Amino acid sequence: MNNKIAIQGIKGSFHHQVAQEYFQDNVLVDECLSFEELVSSLLLGNSEQAVMAIENSIAGPIIPNYALIDKNNLHIIGEHYLNINQNLMALKGQKIEDITEVHSHPMAILQCMDFLKKYPNIKLVEDKDTAETARRIQQKQLKGIAAIASETAAEMYELEILAHKIQTIKNNMTRFVILKKENSFVPENEIKRASLKFELDHKRGSLAAVLNVMSDCKMNLTKIQSLPKIETPWKYSFFVDITFDKYEDYAKAKSLLIIMAEYFKVLGEYKNTKE
């Protein structure tokens, strides 16, 4: 049986950190360069489960990933939240004063600009991956060059952290979902969260009616996002996340939504880790 977990990025990435926390420290991972490759890993049987970032507390939902889950009929079986802490790291024995260049993913650099502005003489170099940059510094023994990456990357590639948690916004959390090709059985009394997709007739009040049903059935709508249907102008798919206390309330809401929506699909039913 293949017990590998597909991650986006390499060992030491935030996806790898989630895999370690959600499963176990010695988890076997399949390193994927893109989210598309991550999905292929599941579909081809190279991995049994996958970790995928789905939304960030600052940047919002990663809509293309919802579309990937939907298009490939994958199942969300769990979730995990991770505080994204960016750290400045370099080969051991160096100080910030020794650093002439900082390499990292452009988003990581952007998240740390307030800190980096304190060192105007340091050149900022965009790279494809935070953890991969850290690994290259160790492999090539690059002195004078620092990476911005996770603490896991620093430990894995034996780099020294010169400054901890240098991101401008300290409370930066990303939600990851755990995916499988086949659905997993979760006892109804443990299911407290669901991810749904539905399409509605393009007429006044159709979305409001659906939201009223959710409210009447005691559903807590934690996220709603629309995605245009390319093949049908002016029609939209809605991706929603809901939480609830009783599965019976959710089952009632689901039975009504199936009738009301032109198309209805459950992307996942799972435990709510934010309780």
Image (tube, rainbow, N blue to C red):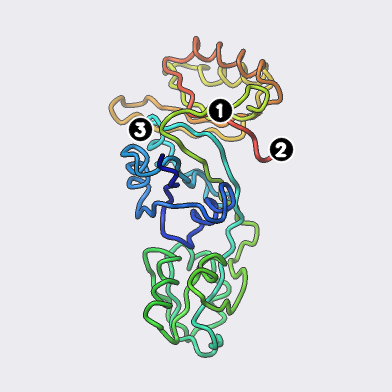
Q: Which residue is mark 2?
A: 275
Alpha carbons under labels 2 and 3: distance apart: 29 Å
Question: At which x and y percent is residue 116?
Answer: 53, 76
Q: Height in image: 274 above or below 160? A: above
Q: Which residue is mark 3?
A: 72
Residue nearest the viewer, comparing 159 with 86: 159
Question: At which x and y percent is residue 141?
Answer: 40, 83
Alpha carbons under labels 2 and 1: distance apart: 15 Å
**Tag 1: Cα neighbours inside 10 Å, few (<14), some, or many (≥20)?**
many
Image quarter (top left, top right, bottom left or bottom right) of the N terminus: top left
Of pointers 2 and 1, the one earlier in the residue sequence: 1
Q: Is residue 210 left or right of residue 28?
A: right
Of pointers 3 and 1, the one earlier in the residue sequence: 3
Alpha carbons under labels 3 and 1: distance apart: 17 Å
Q: Give the residue drawn at x 49%, y 64%.
A: 108
Q: Give the residue drawn at x 45%, y 22%.
A: 265
Q: Is residue 57 left or right of residue 51?
A: right
Give the residue type at disc 1: Glu
Q: Which secondary structure lies at badge 2? A: loop
Image quarter (top left, top right, bottom left or bottom right) of the C terminus: top right
Q: Which secondary structure lies at badge 1? A: strand
Q: Which residue is mark 1?
A: 269
Question: In which quarter of the view is residue 231 placed?
Answer: top left
Residue nearest the viewer, comparing 36 with 234: 36
Q: Residue farthest to the front? A: 1
